């Protein structure tokens, strides 16, 4: 054990109560996934209960782990329960076996058994004395994946936890233990796919030299049910294939992709598929040849079909030429093509229409393409949310989006329901990873909770962020109920705090240029209008905010009439989205009777105050956890407070040059 940080939520802390559950485990260890189950149980048992399990197939088992095709007919009830589950589901049940109470984990296949094992371990980490189980669970989404934005040179785009964990130089022969621990952590929350490199990467990864390395990683991940995906640069046929064009309707190009795909499957028989960023921020795509997204995506989809691979075609498309409201672009480019994508294409849509802001209304594409499969893309790494210096519990953000009602197919068409799609059809959720070479994986110890929480919500988009925070704390730090109660409170409030001290009341994209760290609302000299923060807040002496109603960009028209009406009408528009959709005078009277300007200052101050509260609360947690992690977080919170104040002071003094009003009395005056 290098450091507690390294073990993530798989701490398996020494238990003060005994439990014989692992004494005698019936498990067939021939298959590599079952071997992974065995390794995990051994580690967990030794650490938690201080004994090594015996693995055998006979005798009085205390724990039976068996596919249900291997169960005895007398175990009908469980078989019925398990039969109703999907391929990755599992059941855990305490049964009578030869007159003794025994715990049984069963599933259709080994991967289900692995998920069931990790579930049992979660339950035991939370309550080590537990002996009675009656659980059946299954993932609601098919593709639950991390998108790494790692470059082949070891840097990570928008990565704040060190460098890439993939050591391309030492692959394929050197398999770092870290890869296995990474796979364990992912499998423990049900993540079953990883795109290894950056969406902006060049095509080198598709050359045999790299495919050999990729295949070594795929092999390491395979026992854990994790498939490897690669980003496919659209111009690859030119760059590594020597063709003159990458036109998706050109036969030679199509043949090139067919051959490339066949070659990839020779290296990686269970290859997941391609993740593609096309015609966005300067990346090549079908539009370079006068074609559209469907032409591009379907070309790759057809090449992958014989191998059951899929295409994740991103809807994040920022044109280099169109400077109208960026919030409208993806919808305009994709929605007309609803129903035209091949069956093995998932359109991967960011949660909001701008870019991973601290708060955005849900993306209007959700629900707008009922004949296509839309997949969610979240950012786990905190590009616009204080990097790995700020404690921000993102499942709260994820949950807010998933719960949003699009009204596209009537009341109750939540984003969660839309991405869940139809039973047995392809569905998914991707998260841009926050993982790097740091000893604690994610830079901030609490950023581990965002990786964990992403996985849990990809498994079940209807889980509550509160439950996720609690179970993460219990496994990662301490089961003490006092500790869990107080610290989950600050986690759950942290996302709202960052919104308040960075971009309250619907403000957005006012971060400093390029790195997006710290405030930069004044920036106004970038080459394209929509790169400049002033374009988004539109502050002038008359007021502030982006008018996206019919009198402005009319982005609202992309939502269902119910939502357009709700956000568009000042009487109903929630304060959280006020300046996202409306440009309002500084003295606009708000619900609390105070004017907009005063409310802005009050929100910024609340954000700062809440960070102060996080610091005192964290101080009170000292007796419950190890000094090392306590101190790490305490230091990071000091940075967070300093920077919350920086945000408040910088934004309010800048906006004051337009409002010409005194700071509200509730606000601490900038020094
Ligand atoms: C943001 C981010 C880029 C990234 C892009 C994307 O714009 O700043 O670094 O490449 O999103 O999602 O493709």
Image: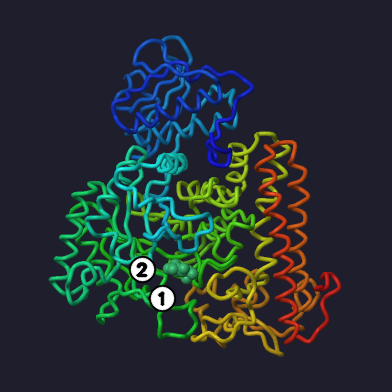
Q: Is residue 32 left or right of residue 646?
A: left
Q: Is mark 1 within 8 Å of ligand 1?
A: yes
Name the residue rendered at 30%, 50% in the picture. 214
Residue 215 visible somewhere in the drawing: yes
**Residue under numbered circle 1:** 281
Compared with 230, 621 (above or below) is above
User: Toward the viewer: 241 or 113?
Assistant: 241
Relative image position of residue 555 (x, y in whole percent): 51, 79
Name the residue rendered at 42%, 60% in the picture. 149
Q: Are the two marked residues, 1 and 2, in contact with CB atoms closer than 8 angstroms?
A: yes
Compared with 468, 103 (above or below) is above
Compared with 382, 247 (above or below) is below
**Residue under numbered circle 2:** 277
Residue at the farthest right position: 665
Relative image position of residue 173 (x, y in whole percent): 30, 43
Q: Is residue 127 left or right of residue 423?
A: right
User: Toward the viewer: 87 or 30?
Assistant: 30
Q: Is mark 2 within 8 Å of ligand 1?
A: yes
Please state, as top left, top right, bottom left or bottom right, where the C terminus lies in the image.
Answer: bottom right
Choose top left, top right, bottom left or bottom right for residue 40: top left
């Amino acid at each position: 054990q290098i450091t507690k940080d390294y073990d993530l939520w798989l701490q398996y802390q020494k238990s003060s109560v005994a439990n014989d559950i692992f004494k005698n485990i019936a498990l067939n260890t021939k298959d590599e996934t079952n071997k992974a189950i065995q390794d995990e149980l051994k580690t967990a048992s030794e650490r938690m209960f201080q004994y090594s399990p015996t693995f055998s197939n006979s005798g009085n088992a205390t724990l039976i782990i068996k596919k249900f095709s291997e169960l005895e007919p007398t175990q009908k009830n469980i078989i019925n329960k398990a039969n109703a589950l999907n391929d990755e589901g599992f059941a855990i049940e305490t049964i009578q076996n030869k007159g003794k109470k025994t715990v049984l984990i069963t599933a259709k296949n080994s991967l289900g058994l692995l998920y069931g094992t990790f579930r049992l371990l979660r339950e035991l980490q939370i309550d080590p004395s537990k002996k009675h189980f009656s659980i059946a669970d299954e993932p609601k989404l098919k593709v639950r994946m991390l998108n790494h934005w790692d470059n082949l040179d070891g840097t990570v785009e928008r990565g704040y936890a060190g460098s890439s964990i993939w050591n391309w130089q030492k692959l394929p022969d050197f398999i770092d233990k870290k890869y296995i621990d990474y796979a364990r952590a992912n499998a423990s929350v049900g993540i079953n796919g990883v795109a290894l490199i950056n969406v902006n990467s060049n095509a080198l990864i598709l050359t045999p030299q790299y495919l050999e390395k990729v295949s070594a990683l795929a092999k390491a991940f395979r026992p854990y049910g994790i498939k490897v995906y690669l980003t496919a640069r659209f111009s690859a046929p030119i760059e590594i294939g020597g063709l003159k064009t990458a036109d998706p309707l050109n036969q030679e190009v199509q043949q090139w992709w067919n051959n490339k795909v066949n070659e990839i499957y020779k290296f990686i028989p269970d290859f997941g598929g391609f993740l593609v960023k096309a015609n966005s921020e300067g990346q090549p795509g079908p539009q370079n040849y006068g074609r559209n997204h469907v032409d591009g995506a379907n070309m790759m989809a057809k090449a992958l079909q014989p191998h059951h691979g899929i295409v994740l075609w991103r809807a994040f498309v920022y044109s280099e030429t169109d400077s109208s409201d960026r919030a409208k672009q993806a919808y305009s480019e994709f929605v007309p093509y609803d129903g035209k994508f091949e069956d093995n294409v998932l359109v991967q849509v960011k949660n909001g229409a701008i870019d991973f802001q601290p708060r955005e209304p849900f993306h209007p594409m959700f629900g707008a393409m009922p004949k296509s499969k839309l997949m969610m893309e979240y950012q786990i790494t905190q590009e616009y949310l204080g990097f790995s210096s700020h404690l921000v519990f993102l499942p709260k953000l994820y949950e807010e989006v998933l719960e949003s009602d699009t009204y596209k197919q009537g009341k109750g068409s939540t984003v969660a329901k839309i991405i869940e799609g139809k039973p047995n059809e392809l569905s998914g959720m991707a998260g841009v990873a926050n993982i790097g070479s740091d000893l604690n994986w994610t830079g901030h110890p609490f950023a581990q909770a965002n990786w964990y929480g992403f996985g849990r919500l990809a498994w079940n988009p209807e889980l509550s962020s509160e439950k996720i925070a609690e179970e993460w704390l219990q496994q990662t730090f301490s089961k003490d109920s006092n500790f869990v109660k107080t610290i989950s409170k600050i986690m759950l409030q942290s996302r709202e705090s960052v919104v308040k001290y960075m971009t309250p009341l619907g403000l957005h994209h006012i971060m400093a240029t390029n790195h997006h760290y710290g405030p930069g609302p004044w920036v106004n000299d970038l080459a394209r209008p929509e790169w400049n923060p002033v374009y988004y807040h539109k502050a002038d002496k008359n007021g502030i905010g982006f008018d996206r109603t019919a009198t402005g960009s009319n982005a609202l028209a992309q939502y269902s009439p119910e939502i357009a009406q709700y956000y568009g009408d000042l009487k109903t528009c929630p304060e959280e989205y006020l300046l996202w959709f409306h440009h309002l005078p500084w003295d606009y009277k708000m619900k609390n009777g105070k004017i907009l300007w005063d409310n802005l200052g009050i929100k910024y101050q609340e954000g700062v105050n809440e960070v102060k509260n996080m610091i005192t609360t964290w101080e009170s947690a000292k007796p419950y956890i190890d000094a090392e992690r306590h101190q790490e977080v305490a230091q990071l919170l000091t940075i967070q407070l300093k920077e919350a104040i920086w945000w408040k002071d910088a934004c309010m003094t800048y906006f004051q040059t337009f409002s010409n009003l005194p700071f509200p009395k509730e606000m601490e005056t900038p020094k």
